[in-house]
Image: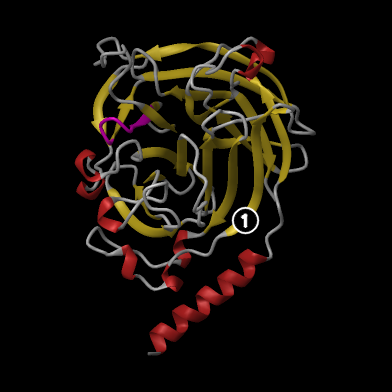
Amino acid sequence: MRHSLFLSLCLLMGGSFMAAAQQAVDLGQVSLSKWKIGTGNYSGIAPMGDGRYAVVSDKEPADGFFVFRIDQNATTGQVASVYLEGFYGNSRPQTDAQGHSVRDCEGVAYFPSARTVFISGEGDQKILEYDLKGQPTGRQLNVPAIFGRERIVDNYGFEALSYSPETHRFWTTTESTLPADGYASGPLHPGEQNLLRLQSFDDNLQPVAQYPYRMDRGKSEDFGKIYAFGVPALTALPDGRLLVLEREADVSNGYMSSEVICKLFIINPRESWQIDSSADLRNIDSNRFPVKTLLARWVTKLTLFNLSFANYEGMCLGRVLNDGRQTLLLISDSQGGFGVGPVSLKDYIRVLILP
């Protein structure tokens, strides 16, 4: 009893502290076309040091990564320039009937001690290691069986991936609820609250800890022709906390009036209860989920007078500003510039300054 009371008190203290957190400063989005970067399906981004970033795209002919050089103003945080160095991909890829990599690369993390890149694939539910030339090393994170390919909702598998060299931890999660944990929120199950499993790994590539995560509720009616609601990105912070991006994209039947709602939360997994793969998330007490604090919320749209629609899927830490503040970079997936003429989608980069 005293143990439970102590843990409850810790959660309440953590919740009070987190609730007092300030909001992030949103500097808005800029199209990558400003720097003559071609359209893509950019779904993940990770810092490699010295202003270089590994970027993955989920519909490339080979599994691998682009390297972007992104320069930010040291005072304001605004992106000053973006330069594409090149693509580094598997020389012997497996492809589908459309000529795309069967891995469906979604998330990326740079592992500085080995100078390698890890890429999460939604097509195979694996997180594989690549050298800096884009060739698989043969190593991979030891993913628990509950995240296996046959145990996910189709197209709602691994997207998020992050690594913190300070805590020596990789982090990932599925985009939406595993069938073992309930229904994925959407047109077939409106009003459901997505329940996810946050999974960490150590430098030996072994699973370390798993925590429950509960998303905000999405819409419950008036769904469009395409609806995607989940967590596409995580960013591990040096102090052990996590940034979680919740994204709700709804594409209307006529495309116009489509919108994407993004929410950025900060959580501290250490303030919640660890679980294992046998846990039933539907029966976990609400105080066992991490306390969520909203840092930013933004909406992009596709209307006659607002063509800002941006499906953000990648997120990572950017540069530290002269005043010590930390920036966050986000990148969107335009589905290869889907659309025609002025209403075609664009790939955006967005900057937030963390409190």
Residue depicted at 46% across the width and 34% down the height: 225
Circle 1 Cα neighbour tier, 10 Å, few/some/many (<14 / 14–19 / ≥20): some
Looking at the rendered structure, the secondary structure element under dot 1 is: strand
Label 1 amino acid?
A: Leu
Residue 197: give x, y in percent of width and height: 36, 54
Q: Residue at x 52, y 18 (%)?
A: 338
Q: Which residue is mark 1?
A: 294
Q: Is residue 137 above or below residue 93?
A: below
Q: Is residue 274 left or right of 165 when viewed as pictured?
A: left
Q: Position of residue 118 (x, y in %)?
A: 36, 30
Q: Is residue 256 visible?
A: yes
Residue 324 in the figure: left or right of residue 273? right
Q: Is any atom of residue 164 visible in this view?
A: no
Q: Which residues are magenta?
A: 117-125
Q: Residue furthest bottom?
A: 1
Residue at left offset 22%, top offset 62% = 278
Q: Is residue 79 above or below residue 288?
A: above
- Dividing the picture into quadrants, the one containing residue 180 is bottom left
In the rendered view, does 5 fall on the left or right side of 22?
left
Residue 154 percent location from the top left of the image: 30, 38
Colour logic? secondary structure
User: Which residue lies at the image location 42% right of the left edge and 47% below the top edge?
Assistant: 186
Residue 50 forms part of the magenta stretch: no
Location of residue 350 by image quarter: top right
Q: Nearer the viewer, residue 197 or 11?
A: 197
**118 in the magenta segment:** yes
Query: Residue 218 at x, y = what percent?
Result: 51, 52
